[in-house]
Amino acid sequence: MHVVITGGNKGIGLSLIKKYLSTGANVTSLCRQSSADLDATQAKVITGIDVTNSESLENAVKDLDPIDLLISNAGLLIGDTFDHFDLENINQQFQVNTLGPLRLAKACAQKLKRGAKYGIITSRMGSIADNTSGGQYGYRLSKAAANAVGKSLSEDFRSQEITVLMLHPGYVKTDMTGGRGLIDTAESAEGLYKILEEKTLEKTGSFWHAFGDELPW
């Protein structure tokens, strides 16, 4: 099994890499730069990857083996409020969080095996129905749009029997959350792994919490 993961030099991405390696999968990590922890694994590491640059992704994947599982994990959070937000910061989050998964899908489309899976690490903060606290405009908007990307891809990839899943990792202790959270990255990766293993084409285009609950849009 060949697994390709973006943003795997730390955090949830690194824990996902370790999880899949422990199952015997061949794992390729696409990231801006590696880390000592990533280098210590058996993953194939391709650095210099920018998910906001289509050419960067296309060059990285052109020589890869066929892909069984693709995971878009690279993400960006720039906190804001209604009183204090910056449109350039919002656009930057769109480029990474929304268009990044779309660019990745386009770059890897010819490498995805029939029956492959594509997991997009999004966030329940992209759920409109679940928004009860406001704020975080850039992150919420970009993740809601990422969910729309995943839903459209699920229809476009259906004829190839490729399952597309939107995945909320939970409130995880990472650099993005400033070390705050309810679970660590290994727990999140374990939950994400189970969903990616269990869900089939019947559930393509759906939105899941790492704990196993289907989330509202």
Image: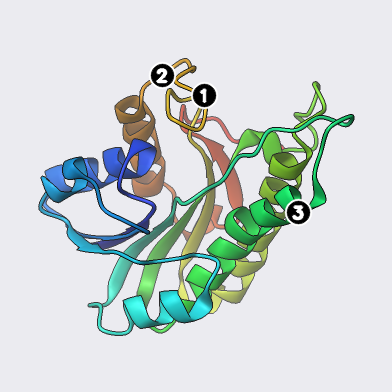
Q: Earlier in the sequence, mark 1 or mark 2?
A: 1
Q: Is residue 72 toward the left or the right of residue 21 in the image?
A: right
Residue indicated by mark 1: 171
Q: Which mark is residue 90?
A: none
Q: Is 146 in front, or is 155?
A: 146
Instruction: Name the image colouring.
Output: rainbow
Report the amino acid beneath label 2: Ile
Residue 171 horizontal/vertical position (percent): 52, 24
Q: What's the amino acid at mark 3?
A: Glu
- Considering only order in the chain, which callout, 2 or 3, is on the residue closer to the N terminus? 3
Q: Which residue is mark 2?
A: 183
* Residue to which mark 3 is pinned: 88
- Circle 3/circle 2 CB separation < 8 Å: no
Q: Quadrant of the C terminus?
A: top right
Q: For numbered disc 2, what is the local secondary structure?
A: loop
**Inter-mark Cα distance, 1 to 3:** 26 Å
Q: Is residue 108 above or below residue 182?
A: below
In front: 208, or 79? 79
Is 106 on the left or on the right of 99, as rendered? Answer: left
The residue type indicated by label 1 comes to Tyr
